[in-house]
Image (cartoon, helix red, strand yellow):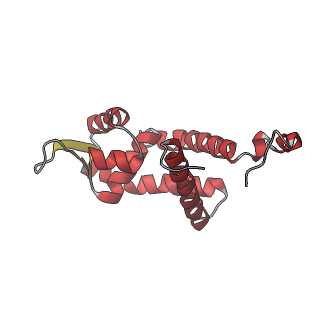
Amino acid sequence: MKPDFRAQPELMDLMKVEVMPCFAIYSAANAVTRFYRRTLARLGLTYPQYLVMMVMWETGGATMKELGEKLLLDSSTLTPLVKKLEADGLVTRARNRQDERLLDIRPTEKGMAMRADGCDAAMAMIEGSGETLEGMRELAVRLGRVRDSLAAVADGQASN
């Protein structure tokens, strides 16, 4: 049951930014991005490019549509990322042979050769967080549930 702030205005004093999960998520996301900016500079990748390469390393390739679905990015955001990775020789883009409406994205040998360094960057973030690998996996699952629930409410698919 959600509190009635109009009937109990003193409850509003409990709503402080430092205890709001939304602020913790927002500020943690900013800290992660700042951490990766320095770490990924050595690889010549931005954080969004790194995410694309993580999918490439995991899957060995995907269609642009699959990539967008996995990373929750639309094509107008994803296309420039992939084009830059292609220009850097890390991925290739080609029309799908079975369905020319689809664009296949595949890592190159150069792109795949970066995988160990990419995994090192992920482990450095985990170590820098002071958390364990298992703790971070559990956090990712919980945050994924929060994201999916909030997205469903925002999209009108669920009610609160």
- Which residue is located at x 35 percent, y 44 percent? 68
Query: In this rendering, does residue 101 appear at all?
Result: yes
65 relative to 130 in the view: left or right: left
- Which residue is located at x 13 percent, y 43 percent? 100
84 relative to 28 in the view: left or right: left
Q: Nearer the viewer, residue 151 or 81?
A: 151
Residue 73 x %, y %: 40, 41
Residue 20 x %, y %: 72, 45
Q: Nearer the viewer, residue 1 or 114?
A: 1
133 relative to 40 in the view: left or right: right
Q: Nearer the viewer, residue 33 or 148?
A: 148
Q: Farthest residue to the right: give it.
A: 10
- Which residue is located at x 57 percent, y 53 percent? 146
Q: How many marks?
A: 0
Residue 120 x %, y %: 48, 56
> Is residue 122 depicted above or below 103 in this figure?
below
Q: Nearer the viewer, residue 47 or 117?
A: 47
Residue 135 x %, y %: 61, 64
> Is residue 55 depicted above or below 138 in this figure?
above
142 relative to 53 in the view: left or right: right
Q: Farthest residue to the front: give it.
A: 7
